[in-house]
Image (spheres, rainbow, N blue to C red):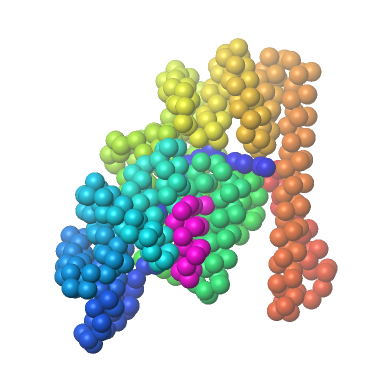
Amino acid sequence: MIRLLPALLFLVLCQTGYSQQITREEADSLNHAITNGKPDTVRIHQLLRIAQFYLFKTVVTPSDSDSAAKLINQAVLLNSKIKSKEADGYIHLVESCLNRKKGQREAGQQKVDEAIKIFQEGTNYSMLGQAYFEKANYYDYDYKDQTIRKRIYFIEPAISAMQKSSDTLNLAYYYYTLGSLHHLISEDEKAKEEANLSLKYYQSMQYQDLSSVYTLLGKLYYSQGDYDLALKDELTALQMAERNRDNSQQLCEILNNLGFIYYKLNDGENALKYFTKSLDIARNRQDNRTIYMVASNVAESYLKLNKPLEAKQFLDGINRTYPKPSEKIYEAGDYANNKVNLRIYVALKQFDKAKFYCEQLIQETKNPHINLAILSSYYAEIIQYYIATSQYSKSLTYLKKNKALLDTTKDFVRMARNYTLWFSQDTSEHNYRAAVFHLMQANKINDSIFNETKARQFQQLGVEFETAKKTDSLKSKDQLIGLLTQKTNLQQLNL
């Protein structure tokens, strides 16, 4: 399996809400229905559903919380007469969401635990799944390895419960969320299976806004080194997201991902364009955490264009304008600043300044929970610094460390890169026999990556061909072969 996390920094967006966002139209319809003398059990459901409308918003204001609390209280009053156990569980679930949104996490955890216990004793599997998912939302405070695994621990039973229900919409969303989390801990085969299941369930409902699923699939193809399929999915996601201007956070992520793909295609100008668009959205949202994440990628694009001074000036401007977030929510908690600054000062040949950032990266590599792909990318930057400063014994130490790591993870893209760095070390030391060997090893792996990617693309094109045949949009096998040749030529150019 080919697996790659970028040298740059992907955006990570919190998945803390439910998929079944409630529209204003539905909430108004429910408000109207409440006045029509429905039975108490139906009215309780309607009241709580409207309360969720207020709580499922991207930004929940104090006014939204107050409106939700009033509706919950009405539901509690009604249920005090009929004493429905299931309604009691639903009330606890919505109360938990309200507590969590207000920062009352301990009280909220108690409520959701009570909801889970009630639903476990019944047969409403949709509500049981929602309760487990709400429990997972209490582990949304950072993206460290152990926290992510805790969220996964509760989302898996949420999916198991949803599979026993007819709630396809939430099932699709839960698979998407689980795939996103598995991708964060580099379990990309699981992530790809879950993303495709999410897509399948959404499409079975003719659900229209699939931008989040397509952007996840784009990241997974990127991780496999399949940049043309990644580009196709991210552009599809962009087209869908642009129809929904309310979701600027999603648009910010997609634009950032497109920047990565163009960066890997050695198109620095387009990479800079998309990263800058992503940064503009983060600035408009006054989201300093995302600003610092994307700013590192903008600086990397300047380096790709061989403009290290512009990269430095740009980052200096960000540091002057926006306070850097103090909380550490990632295992590599500096928003990639150490890595990009090391690269900038090496490019500027200001090795005394580069030394500080190299030492910072070395400290980060000692984190026992750091993502292994990020660890390898840090090793690569440290190696390049030591080669540039002719400290060959130190660079050799990290070349060996990186090889041992990559032999374990089977990350062939980075493995080829490590052999290329070894080639640089050998040539710097005039060890040409070893240089030839390491260059041949890098080329052998790159050929293997190319062949695997081509086979996967052929399979994908076969599916596209069969689909297109049904709509008469392709008329001959020659057209399929032409499409495959086009994609093959692009992949050769990438390599």
Residue 280 picture location, percent across and down: 38, 53
Q: Residue 208 location in percent, x, y? A: 49, 72
Instruction: Give whichever of 383, 32 is nearer the camera.
Output: 32
Q: Relative to 13, is 404 above or below?
A: above
Give the side of residue 180 with respect to residue 422, left or right: left
- Residue 163 magenta: yes
Total marks shown come to 0
**Residue stretch in magenta:** 156-179
User: Can residue 386 be seen in this snapshot?
Assistant: yes
Q: Is residue 374 above or below residue 250?
A: above
Decide whether the magenta segment is chiefly helix, strand or loop: helix
Image point 34% across, 55% down: which residue?
Answer: 117
- Residue 354's x, y, as percent? 46, 22
Name the residue located 71 percent from the left edge and 67 percent from the top edge. 464
Which part of the image, by quadrant, shows the N terminus? top right
Q: Residue at x 54, y 33 (%)?
A: 372
Write down the quadrant of residue 425 in the picture: top right
**Considering the image in quadrants, where does the C terminus appear?**
top right
The magenta stretch spans residue 487? no
Does residue 433 appear to the left or right of 372 in the view shown?
right
When the figure is inspected, residue 94 is found, relative to residue 404, above or below; the finding is below
Q: Residue furthest bottom?
A: 36
Quarter occupied by residue 63:
bottom left
Whether residue 390 is visible to the viewer of this picture, yes or no, is: no
Q: Position of residue 471 (x, y in %)?
A: 70, 79
Horizontal side of residue 446 vs 276, given as left or right: right
* On screen, residue 66 above or below 81: above
Camera-nearest residue between 232 and 341: 232
Q: Nearer the viewer, residue 436 or 111?
A: 111
Q: Residue at x 72, y 56 (%)?
A: 457
